[in-house]
């Protein structure tokens, strides 16, 4: 998570250094990968890296991020389907269902815009919300299972969950109508699921404390 934070800071720097979305007149089509590559090259040119090498490496890096994100999302989707089905779905069936669901998002459109492009802005919040919920699980395990203080995971957990929920709430407010409605709906679903998990963890900890007091 900390390394991802460093990557996020570098990504912000590269976008700022790019300055603007490049136009076709500059020789290459205006796309996020090339824009990121230019920003990356300008940033690392300050340290002596040739700009041509920087552009190629930057474009390679961002495409690697996309590919690994797709791989992780597919794997997590398979895990969740198997858990929700209590293990009745084997890994192959669960993977096929996950990929088919992704294909639906690819071909489904709102107007002329594919749905996956509409919900893409929620990726960052969902990704960091996963980190917050992972910290929530670790905190609950330390407190309930190991019976030890867990402030060193609890404080980052609170920060991550509050920050990402705030971002999702802003997305909901900005996308409750119009062609970006799917983005608002996905954001609402993520908020509900996150709050549900937080409440479940809290109730589990309270129940454990009550049982200990009675004993």
Image (cartoon, rainbow, N blue to C red):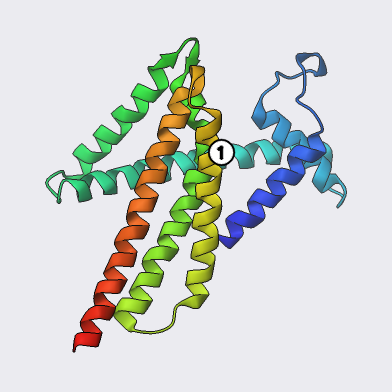
Q: What residue sits 49% from the left and 47% below the top?
A: 127
- Residue under circle 1? 170
* Residue 53 in sight from this viewpoint: no
User: Depth check: 57 or 143 in front?
Assistant: 143
- Location of residue 142 by image quarter: bottom left
Question: Where does the image place residue 27, in percent across and percent down from the top left?
Answer: 78, 18
Quadrant showing the N terminus = bottom right
Q: Is residue 56 above or below residue 90?
A: above
Q: Is residue 215 above or below residue 145?
A: below
User: Depth check: 125 or 114 in front?
Assistant: 125
Secondary element type, mark 1: helix
Q: What residue sits 21% from the left and 51% below the top?
A: 83
Question: Where does the image place residue 49, in percent across and percent down from the top left?
Answer: 83, 47
Q: Is residue 193 left or right of residue 66?
A: left
Q: Is residue 158 left or right of residue 212?
A: right
Q: What residue sits 50% from the left and 22% below the top?
A: 180
> Which class describes the residues within 10 Å of circle 1: few (<14), some (14-19), or many (20+)?
few
* Residue 129 in sight from this viewpoint: yes
Quadrant showing the C terminus = bottom left
Which residue, as the protein is rendered here, is positioned at the far left?
88
User: Depth check: 54 or 154 in front?
Assistant: 154
Question: Where does the image place residue 77, in percent across and percent down from the top left?
Answer: 32, 43
């Amino acid at each position: 998570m900390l390394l991802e934070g460093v990557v996020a800071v570098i990504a912000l720097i590269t976008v700022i250094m790019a300055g603007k979305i490049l136009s076709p007149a500059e020789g290459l089509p205006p796309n996020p990968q090339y824009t990121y590559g230019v920003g990356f090259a300008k940033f690392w040119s300050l340290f002596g890296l040739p700009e041509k090498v920087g552009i190629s490496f930057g474009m390679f890096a961002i495409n690697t991020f996309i590919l690994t994100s797709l791989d992780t999302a597919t794997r997590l989707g398979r895990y969740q389907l198997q858990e929700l089905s209590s293990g009745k779905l084997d890994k192959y069936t669960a993977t096929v269902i996950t990929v088919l669901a992704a294909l639906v998002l690819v071909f489904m459109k709102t107007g002329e815009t594919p749905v996956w492009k509409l919900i893409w802005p929620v990726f960052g919040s969902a990704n960091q919300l996963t980190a917050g919920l992972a910290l929530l699980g670790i905190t609950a395990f330390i407190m309930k299972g190991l019976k030890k203080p867990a402030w060193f995971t609890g404080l980052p957990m609170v920060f991550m969950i509050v920050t990402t929920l705030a971002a999702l709430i802003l997305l909901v407010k900005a996308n409750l109508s119009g062609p970006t409605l799917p983005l608002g709906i996905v954001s609402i679903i993520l908020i509900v699921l996150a709050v549900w998990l937080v409440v479940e963890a809290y109730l589990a900890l309270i129940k454990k404390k009550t049982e200990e007091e009675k004993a």
